[in-house]
């Protein structure tokens, strides 16, 4: 099986996400007495778009946070990271970057060298070290059901291939704790990732110099929880866990927003 045809796919002790994150202590620290809250940048992953952050964004906006949820092109690790870095360069003041799934490798690269980025939040996301690949991390531990059998591959351009999750697998593999009516719409509008992203090595990781937080999805069928815990522990991330599928930000938006606010303190 070739790379392009295979499955696409702690610093602190892990605790259950719940009341602790929703407590007043999780409100943003305004920093330096300026009263300014950091801008939260929400980065989606593959098979999705920025609308997956809607419920999280609405909570953050209601609590006074500036929020931006830019498109992730899903074309290559290098170009997607450069695209996001360009967006970040237009934003002033402190930033908190939040990533889901493939978005994790993008923020890990895009934030490197940006002194405005004060925190990284990974939601069931990839947290690679330099030279690592998505495929290597996804298959490091058993448990992923996002195999070749779950994917459709469609050519585009000259010798290029996009990967999509097949309809019969989408609910159970990607978002098993959401209503089927919801996942049918998500499947219909899914954005594919270029299959080359699977084997593209990551660059120098921002998490080595920027504090990080991680939300582990215990019921994740895409990125095994064991892999999530390994990456979070290695990054020294403040780690929390929830009984949720791969799309924790949709299934548990309140807990996700509370974790972001904790990171923004």
Image: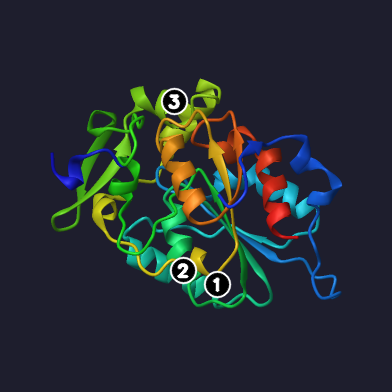
Q: Which residue is mark 1?
A: 88
Question: Is there any visible trace of residue 29 in the rendered image?
Answer: yes
- Mark 2–mark 1 CB contact (< 8 Å): yes
**N-term mark: 2 or 1:** 1
- Number of the front mark, 2 or 1: 2
Quadrant into which the N terminus falls: top left
Q: 195 and 33: which one is in front? A: 33
In the rendered structure, are the residues bearing label 3 and label 1 in contact, judged by CB atoms less than 8 Å apart? Answer: no
Tell me which residue sits at (29%, 54%) in the image: 197
- The answer for how far apart the CA atoms under marks 2 and 1 are is 8 Å
Left or right: where 146 falls relative to 223: left
Q: CA distance from mark 3 to mark 2?
A: 30 Å
- Residue named by callout 3: 171
Q: How is the image coloured?
A: rainbow
Measured in 3D between alpha carbons, the distance from the residue under mark 3 to the one under mark 1, in whole angstroms, is: 33 Å
Q: Secondary structure at mark 1?
A: helix
Q: Position of residue 227 (x, y in %)?
A: 41, 41
Residue 141 picture location, percent across and down: 34, 37
């Amino acid at each position: 099986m070739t790379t392009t045809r295979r499955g696409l796919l702690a610093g602190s002790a892990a605790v259950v996400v719940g009341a602790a994150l929703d407590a007043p202590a999780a409100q943003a620290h305004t920093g330096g007495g300026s009263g300014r809250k950091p801008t939260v940048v929400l980065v989606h992953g593959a098979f999705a778009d920025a609308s997956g952050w809607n419920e999280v964004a609405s909570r953050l906006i209601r609590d006074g946070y500036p929020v931006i949820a830019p498109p992730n092109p899903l074309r290559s690790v290098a170009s997607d990271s450069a695209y996001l870095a360009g967006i970040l360069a237009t934003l002033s003041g402190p930033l908190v970057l939040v990533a889901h799934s493939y978005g994790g490798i993008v923020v890990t690269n895009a934030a490197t060298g940006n002194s405005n980025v004060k925190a990284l939040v990974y939601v069931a996301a990839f947290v690679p070290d330099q030279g690592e690949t998505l495929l290597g991390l996804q298959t490091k531990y058993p448990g992923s059901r996002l195999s070749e059998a779950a994917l459709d591959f469609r050519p585009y351009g000259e010798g290029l291939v996009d990967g999509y999750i097949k309809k019969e697998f989408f609910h159970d593999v990607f978002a098993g704790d959401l209503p089927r009516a919801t996942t049918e719409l998500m499947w219909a509008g899914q954005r594919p990732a270029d299959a080359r992203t699977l084997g593209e090595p990551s660059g120098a990781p921002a998490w080595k110099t920027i504090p990080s937080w991680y939300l582990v999805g215990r019921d994740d069928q895409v990125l095994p929880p064991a892999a999530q815990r390994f990456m979070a522990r290695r990054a020294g991330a403040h780690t929390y866990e929830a009984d949720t599928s791969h799309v924790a930000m949709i299934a548990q938006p309140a807990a996700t927003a509370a974790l972001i606010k904790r990171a923004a303190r």
